[in-house]
Amino acid sequence: MSGLKILMTNSLLFSLQRGLCQALAPKTYFRNIKTLTQGDVCPNEGFLKVVTCSYEGRKYCSLIQGQPRCSVAAMEGTPSAPDEVTCASGSEAGQYREVTSDDWKLSSGEFLKFPLDPEKENYVRRNVLNSVFSMVNPTPLEGQTALAGVSARALDVIDLHSSVASSTRFRDFASGGWIHPGSTPLAHRYGGHQFGWWAEQLGNGRAHLLGHYVNRNGSWWELQLKGSGKTPYSRGGDGRAVIRSSVREFLAAEAMAALGFRTSRSASIVVGEELALRDQFYNGNLKMEKMAVVLRLAPTWFRFGSLEILARRNEIELLQLLVDHIIEKHFRSIAVTDPDRYLSLFSKIVEETAEMIAQWQSVGFTHGVMNTDNMSVASVTIDYGPFGFLDTYDPDFIPNSSDDEGMYSYKNQPKVGHYNLHRLADALRPLLSPSQIQQIKHILPGFHVHFQTAYLQLFARKLGLQNSKIEDETLVQSLLDIMKDSKADFTMTFWELGNLSLEDIEAKNVPRNFWSLPKILSHYKFDSFLSQYKLRLEEENSSEETRQSIMASANPRYILRNWIAQQVIEKVEQGNYGELDQVLKILNSPFSIQPIAEKKGFASSPPKWSKTLRVSCSS
């Protein structure tokens, strides 16, 4: 199976179990797990599903039927199962309750090894040369600040207990008002292709890299503030981020993590009294909006554009230094002494970017601004701006009202991903020998193979299939075509299909509260699809229980629809933060029916007013 590397030895498995046990709650168990280092599709040896637990988004293959729940880092089992490991230590082991703790070691040391911008004055300049970072402190929000939201799951990634958020020191740290002793705040210089055109120098115009942290399991995470003030790369901006964009990013990153996808994380959002002018839709209608700062985490904040700017400016020694750093810290399976390391790096990024975009497609997520400066070299989703999840299935869906030509529509995302990887290959070319330049040309076409493989595996699971094969593309596409014609809801069609027996589906015996599935049942091509679907299930000798179990783990009931985000935004702008916390809790368990979410209508047909909502690049 392309792209998957499974750790299968007993010694490795026991080591993994023993290490994870150190941080788990009492009576938490592992059962029949295999770690996935890449991809998110289980091998064929009887494994039904991938389980992604909140702890670092680490993935496990599971034999458990139904939808397992995750503890800190592992699935919960039952004490009667013979193939489990019991973890007896408390869930708070290794967590700190203060960012001032001597043992909580945030550091900027690795970044300070790069050549830094010699200009220390913080004023906007167009041409920073021979530097990866500029040193610049955040600008604290004016007036009284308030912690509007915090993600306990994201804090746990960096070994912080959720109680840390109750301190004034943490609120100041998370909004730029207090600098950790180990931190030297930096703004990163990068470039990028935006909507297909080279945009020259861009950089962190309103973000500050606070440093990196290596957590109790040895994972590297980089902490960054967004909306924390001007930098040398602010261009014409004020260095701030408004509440509406900050709330959307805070919720989106955590929602994607709960869905099991590789993503940046959002630890907190702090709002202030400071106001700034914004023209949300670039139509001349300016208004004053409140500002916020988000504390973001990612394995790395280096992007395709980080390499592009160095190659474009012919800063080749610095390019090599940066790429070698990326390999050493984030691609440890590649030796930094390997003469073919840059080819190996590119091959990994091609594969993992294809898998990431396939994940997007599988839940109807549309990024909205797939510029090369928004593409992570670690293939995690970053920079949640004018994104959107599909309501009705429309492959031409464009979430970003600034995208007049639909370049970054839902259906175009794989094509744009390939284009962006081509630009990354261009940036790596100065580091390659003539023979390697020829070889890299043969790596890039592999994107389509990796994407199709991951896409079919994900959609096979959405249909309850235990395995995928190339012929499934016809089956999947026929259902999507029916959904498009019927204007059926993308998320709820799959969910309802997985919560009704095939017998009831064939008899069109549908519960009254199922509001999307009936739209496709009446389509003239549905019976043909159903016949092919049943044959495919029979081919696998799959039971109804197995089909529904697999679908339960692949199809969320709740997603961050734009109208849900908008309701939260309006509450936060009014100083009411309870709704933000409540929606975060719902999105943290997207596969489980939750009474409060049902009461709020989060799984109901979107309200009519939601059709008028628009989002843009303005933030």
Image (cartoon, helix red, strand yellow):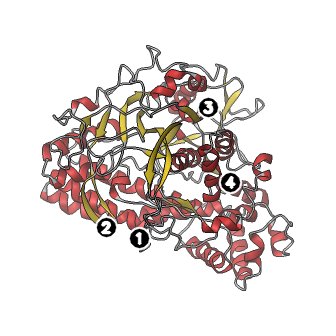
Q: CA distance from mark 4 to mark 2?
A: 33 Å
Q: Nearer the viewer, residue 315 or 368?
A: 368
In the picture of the structure, the residue carrying the numbered disc 1 is: 407
Name the residue nearer the viewer: 251 or 103. 251
Label 4 or label 2, whichever comes before in sequence order? 2
Residue 196, disc: 2
From what the image shows, is residue 147 above or below residue 439?
above
Where residue 81 appears, as percent x and y from the top left, is: 75, 34
Q: Amino acid at mark 2?
A: Gly
Q: Which mark is residue 558?
A: 4
Instruction: Choose the circle earlier in sequence order: 3 or 4.
Output: 3
344 with respect to 151 (left or right): left
Query: Does label 1 or label 3 sit earlier along the sequence?
Result: 3
Q: Nearer the viewer, mark 3 or mark 4?
A: 4
Disc 4 + disc 2, Cβ < 8 Å: no
Q: Evaluate if marks 1 and 4 touch, with contact meaning CB atoms under 8 Å apart.
A: no
